[in-house]
Image: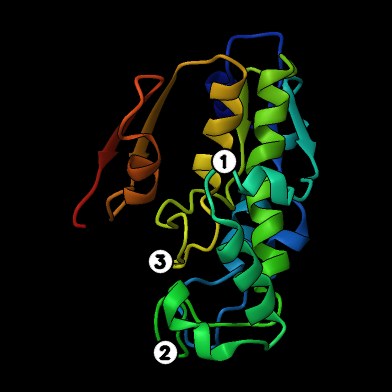
Amino acid sequence: MSSRLESLAPHSHEPTVFVYHDRLTRHVLSDNHVFKPYRLRDTYNLLNSLGAFELNNAKLTEPRQVSVDELRCFHTAEYINAVSELAQGQKLSDAAKFGFSSDGDNPIYADMYDSALWTTGASSTATDHLLGSRCAVAVNFSGGLHHAMPNYAAGFCIFDDPVIAIKQMTNAGARVAYVDIDCHHGDGVQTAFYETDQVLTISLHESG
């Protein structure tokens, strides 16, 4: 066990929760797409090799799928249905309307609906633990898909898991500060909360 990892652990009796399962690595967008699932496995394997999950205040937990009702707090019913239908090879002529294309950031692939439900659900699982006072810190390193808009996909992002998680918190009465550090602007999250004083969004980005 790494003493350095222990020194970085939160000073709390409540655990740090890591949400992970191999089912979160099903997003094979295409062979040459830059958004590769191995980045999640490598992150998990690195943390595991360092003993991060064996620390006294660490807990590894499996995700749940997000529900359609939870998605509808931000995404339109038409869009959610379209993602499901496109993943089944139906209504492909509508793909561009919802931000999908064969050679763009968001190609259609068979597992995309199910995969997006798990990824978004992983962030919701992390939020469940936080709201239930079962942890001090919750981590979902498959999440952060901050470009998805209410009615279309963008920038590799199908469902906006940060928005869904923040909505869980605000529905519970919390005021949230969201800090986004990425190459690109967290535009989906900004769009969701631009007109509310319950959420402060800060995006530190290179472009977008």
Packing grade of label 1 (10 A; few <14, some 14-19, many >=20) is: many
Q: Tell me where residue 38 sits by quadrant.
A: bottom right
Give the residue displayed 45% in from the left and 65% down from the top.
152
User: Three-letter amino acid code at disc 2?
Assistant: Asp
Among the two numbered marks 2 and 1 on one chain, the one whose residue lies closer to the N terminus: 2
Which residue is labeled 3 in the image? 154
Q: CA distance from mark 2 to mark 3?
A: 13 Å
Residue 168 visible at all:
yes
Residue 189 drawn at (x, y percent): 39, 43
Which residue is labeled 1 in the image? 164
* Foreground residue among 60 and 92: 92
Q: Tell me where residue 56 sits by quadrant.
A: top right
Above or below for 180 versus 177: below
Tag nearer the camera, 2 or 1:
1
User: Three-letter amino acid code at disc 1?
Assistant: Ile
Q: How many numbered marks have been drawn onto this rendered protein structure?
A: 3
* Foreground residue among 112 and 41: 112
- Secondary-structure class at tag 1: helix
Q: Tell me where residue 167 sits by quadrant.
A: top right
Residue 66 drawn at (x, y percent): 72, 48
Above or below for 66 versus 169: below
* Foreground residue among 95 and 12: 95
Give the residue displayed 61% in from the left and 87% down from the top.
91
The N terminus is located in which quarter?
top right
Give the residue displayed 54% in from the left and 52% down from the top.
75
